[in-house]
């Protein structure tokens, strides 16, 4: 198919070449011969009047024009694939689709588990592949490998894609119930005097949280253990004098299952705001729109005890 003298089949080749920056690897991904990939690159160079890929030492680098094409080419292909997948009539009970979801185990515990349980009755053919957000989450998302991303708003703001607030939560402190039996209220001195379990979801998150204390209190927390997930936090404070600071919703769930006590944090800190982000090309997809609605409905439903 041609559009304005451009062979649209070349768009797929261009997308892979821009990502791989290597003709051999691109041909392997495209399942075509290296000579065919080289010929396609030649046609692309003729059309754009630009080298697109240039040899620099042992590797190939993108020209400035090629760099400017990365995002629009990927977006055009994602929109085309989404348009092909859309069906005119959408019935949740009969849909057969799979969506990749990236979120923390905190969001899985307080929100996504309820969504998955609900899908069993309302849309059994809709499958969710839920994984923790990778460290390079922005890059992975832009490559079209995540259909639903739920992350704190400070990271979501970096993405120029549709997004909506899912929920807000505050911080609380969790301690072993036995170690906290004589504590009525947690003071700042007591908080800083004890050892801490620190939840670090990537270097940037942990650094921001740790540096927050120093200019306000002139001292830092004594971190004795670090983890990259919320779910094992109670196991690491039980039987110790340690404290872990985490989000209230999940902490309350844990307090029902483990011998721990929760205390109001002895400091003021901005609530965490979790935001759902999705690719522009899926904005009008009926199945995806329905899934987003199911997530928001679960987020806004009354919680037990509230």
Image (cartoon, rainbow, N blue to C red):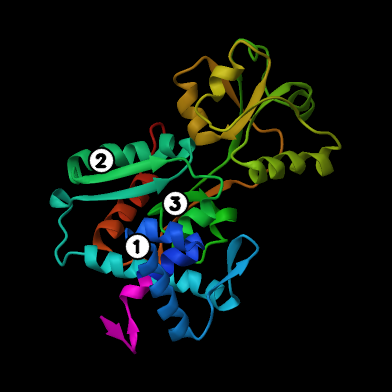
Earlier-in-chain disc, 1 versus 3: 1
Numbered label attached to residue 33: 1
Question: Please, what secondary structure does the residue beneath circle 2 have?
Answer: helix
Residue 166 image point, x, y percent: 44, 51
Question: Quick check: can you spot residue 306?
Answer: no
Residue 71 image point, x, y percent: 48, 69
Q: For residue 36, what is the image quadrant? A: bottom left
Q: Residue at x 57, y 40 (%)?
A: 170
Asked if the magenta segment contains residue 146, the reply would be no
Residues at circles 1 and 2 in contact by the CB criterion of under 8 Å: no
Q: Which residue position is annotated with label 2?
A: 118
Q: Residues within 10 Å of mark 1 (few under 14, many from 20)?
A: some
Asked if the magenta segment contains residue 9, the reply would be yes
User: What stretch of residues is rendered in magenta?
Assistant: 1-11
- Seen in the picture, residue 184 relative to 18 is either above or below; the reply is above
Is 36 placed left or right of 277 in the picture?
left
Residue 92 image point, x, y percent: 18, 52
Q: Residue at x 49, y 74 (%)?
A: 69
Q: Which residue position is annotated with label 3?
A: 149
Q: Residues within 10 Å of mark 3 (few under 14, many from 20)?
A: many
Is 164 placed left or right of 136 in the picture?
left
């Amino acid at each position: 198919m041609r559009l304005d003298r451009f062979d649209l089949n070349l768009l797929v080749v261009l997308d892979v070449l821009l990502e791989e920056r290597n003709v051999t690897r691109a041909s392997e991904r495209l399942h075509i011969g290296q000579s065919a990939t080289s010929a396609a690159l030649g046609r692309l160079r003729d059309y754009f009047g630009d080298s697109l890929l240039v040899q620099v030492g042992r590797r190939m680098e993108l020209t400035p024009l090629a760099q400017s094409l990365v995002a629009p080419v990927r977006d055009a292909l994602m929109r085309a694939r989404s348009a092909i997948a859309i069906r005119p009539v959408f019935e949740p009970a009969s849909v057969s689709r799979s969506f990749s979801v990236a979120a923390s185990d905190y969001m899985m515990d307080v929100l996504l588990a309820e969504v998955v349980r609900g899908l069993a009755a309302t849309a059994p053919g809709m499958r969710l592949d839920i994984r923790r957000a990778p460290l390079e989450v922005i890059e992975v998302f832009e490559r079209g490998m995540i259909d639903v991303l739920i992350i704190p708003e400070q990271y979501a703001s970096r993405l120029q894609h549709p997004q909506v607030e899912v929920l807000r939560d505050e911080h609380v402190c969790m301690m072993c119930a036995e170690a906290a039996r004589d504590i009525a209220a947690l003071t700042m001195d007591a908080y800083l005097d004890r050892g801490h379990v620190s939840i670090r979801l990537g270097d940037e998150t942990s650094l921001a949280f740790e540096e927050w204390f120093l200019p306000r209190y002139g001292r830092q927390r004594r971190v004795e253990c670090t983890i990259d997930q919320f779910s094992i936090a109670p196991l690491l404070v039980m039987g110790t004098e340690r404290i872990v600071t985490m989000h209230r919703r999940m902490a309350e769930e844990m307090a029902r299952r483990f011998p721990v006590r929760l205390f109001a944090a002895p400091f003021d800190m901005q609530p965490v705001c979790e935001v759902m982000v999705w690719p522009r090309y899926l904005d009008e997809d009926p199945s995806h729109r329905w899934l987003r609605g199911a997530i928001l409905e679960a987020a806004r439903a009354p919680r037990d005890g509230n």
